[in-house]
Amino acid sequence: MNDLSWEREDDRGHFKIATNPTLVDHDFINLSFASEETYWAKPLPPDQLATLLSNSITLGVYEIQLQPNIPSARSISEPSSPRTPSSTVQEQSPQQQQLKQIGLARFITDHVTTAYLTDVYVAPAYRKYGLGKWLIACCDEVIEAHPALRRALLAASPGIGKPFYEREMGMRDVVEESGHVAIMSKKRFRVPGE
């Protein structure tokens, strides 16, 4: 599950979602953890953040920025007159893709039976682009890729979050399973270094 990726391009830009851990921008993750929108998270020291990410499936949301390749200076051995292009060959200037991380979603998982979705975040400048819905659709694909899935979990705000995840992922409130399951938690925020 660490090599999944999706791309889309529209009038607002070219975007990619990928589970490749080498693409994740640790500084962006800590900035997102420091934002008021992620009230449940706090920035972490680099070693703890690396451990957190290595034990998760992180879907990074990236804006693909195309950078033109700048040709190197001509060597003395190159002809001084310009080449005449062939009528059958169209020369294109190659471009390099540069990825700017603009969002994330993270799964805590055993990769087989259980997946807990957390830390869903899209940078404020990129909201209202439909990227959040697209990210959640990709998360749903990651959940479905678990070969013997028993349960996928998440915690959401009752106002906006609950109806969003019900609609977009088919998630249900565990209260609806009253008498069959109790989801329990212990909540504590500890600042690193305390």
Image: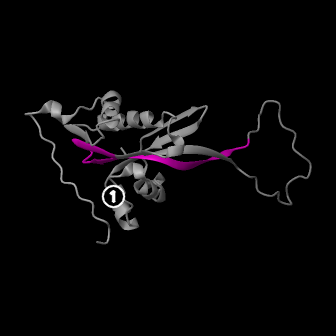
Q: As drawn, is 60 to the left or to the right of 174?
A: right
Inspect the magenta stretch and tell me whether residue 189 lies in it: no
Residue extending furthest toward the right: 81
Name the residue rendered at 27%, 38% in the picture. 146
Mark 1 neighbour density, 10 Å: few (under 14) some (14–19) many (20 or more): some
Q: As drawn, is 78 to the left or to the right of 59?
A: right
- Which residue does the numbered mark 1 point to in the structure image? 52
Q: Position of residue 2 (x, y in %)?
A: 38, 47
| SS at circle 1 | helix
Name the residue rendered at 27%, 60% in the picture. 189
Dominant secondary structure of the residues highlighted in magenta in the image: strand
Bounds of the magenta span? 93-118
Q: Position of residue 111 (x, y in %)?
A: 27, 45
Which kind of residue does numbered mark 1 sit on? Leu
Q: Position of residue 162 (x, y in %)?
A: 30, 34
Q: As drawn, is 4 to the left or to the right of 71?
A: left
Inspect the magenta stretch and tell me whether residue 96 lies in it: yes
Residue extending furthest toward the bottom: 193
Question: Closer to the camera, 38 or 146?
Answer: 38
Name the residue rendered at 45%, 54% in the picture. 22
Q: Is residue 112 visible?
A: no
The quadrant of the image that shows the N terminus is top left
| The quadrant where residue 45 appears | bottom left
Count the marks: how many? 1
The quadrant of the image that shows the C terminus is bottom left
Name the residue rendered at 23%, 31% in the picture. 172
Q: Is residue 43 visible?
A: yes
